[in-house]
Amino acid sequence: MGLFSGREVSILGAGMYVPERIMTNDDLSKMVETSDEWIRERTGIRERRIARDDELTSDLAYNASLVALKDSGVLPSELDMVIVATNTPDTLFPGVAPKLQGKLKASRAGAFDVQSGCTGCIYAITVAVSGIACGLWNKVLVVGAEVLSRIINWQDRNTCVLFGDGAGALVLGPSLSGQGHFISAELRSDGARSDLITLPGGLIEHPASEETLREGLHYVHMKGNDVFKFVNRLLPSFLKKMVQTAGYQSDQIDWWLFHQANLRIVEGVLRRLDVDMDKAFVNLDRYGNTSAASIFLALAELFDSVNLVKGQKLVLSSFGAGMTYGAILYEM
Ligand code: ACO
């Protein structure tokens, strides 16, 4: 893994959608033994969005995609591929991407889901960029969408305070002269730590049964503190090397967009990289951890709120169930 070659690939448009309903830390403290103070101090999260009962992951993905397509000026009929990163598909099959492709009437496009924990966003974008760079595809819609609120045990304070629902989308295509482009990507996995974040029930290993229901195996299980240590130990040197491979030093990166899981993780990683916190874009305070949607939400809000200048460099980086992790370097 390393530098992209072939045609240069640009972000042509970005968009996001979050459900209307806001759940605050105070709301949570009425449901489990926790407090606004604990959640803010340990995670940085203040509130998160929760999908309506009739809203599906494919609906969130559709709403975000409409915004990104409009932003890019690309029509659904021009898309060659629709890729959705999600850990909460409406159903195991069909996937979210084919449903989205159908809803958008993207009649020429193929469609598939990427499921790789929160890092699914980095994997999905990398596959999209590679497909365009080598000439296989021209225009690709790549989406991160999650309705995590339906796979969370709302009685487990170790997990329920962390997650939220949302979707973000990017339209990618070959660069025209003067447009920004993807420089490099690095995708990794440490499957030996696959026990850290799991949803074990309802499939092949533990088919749905009264017992899996009773034991709550259909919910997210996470060894939070072990994830915290794993990430803090691994990410700084991984990112430093990733940036160096592309010919830069950490202090030459203008914006760091981390998986929006925990503010203490963002602070810890940047401290070890010797980079100021004002180089990080953070919106986890308003959305919590939206897993594979998280980087997409951060990018859409960065593009909306910051006047980015040509030549500025962004690092997108995530980690999650697997344990998978990865990063992408983009130049505006
Ligand atoms: N409110 C109050 N107390 C709590 C809560 C809560 N919501 N949750 C846990 N506690 C308690 C624990 O029970 C524990 O109590 P004890 O000492 O009496 O046993 C104490 O707080 C400390 O618990 P820790 O787990 O050690 O707390 P920590 O500082 O590690 O923070 C947290 C926990 C926020 C989960 C942190 O470890 C974290 O963010 N980890 C990373 C998780 C993550 O980023 N996951 C991303 C991947 S998710 C994916 O891929 C789908």
Image (cartoon, rainbow, N blue to C red):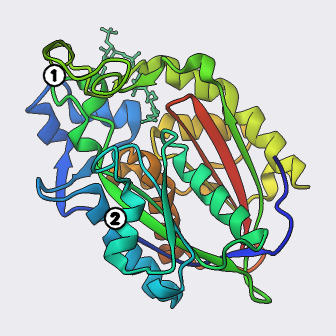
Which of the two labelled residues, at mark 2 and mark 1, occupies the earlier sequence position? 1
Q: Which amino acid does the dot numbered 2 rest on?
A: Lys
> Residue at horizontal 56%, vertical 41%?
266
Residue under circle 2?
99
Real-space CA distance between mark 2 and mark 1, rounded to the nearest whole angstrom: 39 Å
Q: Is mark 1 within 8 Å of ligand 1?
A: yes
Task: Report the image quarter containing ligand 1.
Answer: top left
Q: Is residue 306 above or below residue 145?
A: below
Relative image position of residue 74 (x, y in whole percent): 52, 88
269, 95: nearer the viewer: 95
> Residue at horizontal 17%, vertical 12%?
211
Residue under circle 1?
33
Relative image position of residue 78 (x, y in whole percent): 53, 86
Question: Are there few (<14), some (14-19), or many (20+) residues within 10 Å of tag 1?
Answer: few
Left or right: 150 in relation to 31: right
79, 181: nearer the viewer: 79
Question: Are there few (<14), some (14-19), or many (20+) residues within 10 Å of tag 2?
Answer: some
200, 167: nearer the viewer: 200
148, 284: nearer the viewer: 148
Q: Is residue 80 above or below residue 213?
A: below
> Residue at horizontal 80%, vertical 45%?
242
Q: Is residue 142 visible?
A: no
Left or right: 234 in relation to 54: right
Q: Secondary structure at mark 1?
A: loop
Relative image position of residue 138 (x, y in whole percent): 66, 79
Q: Is mark 2 within 8 Å of ligand 1?
A: no
Q: Which amino acid does the dot numbered 1 rest on?
A: Glu
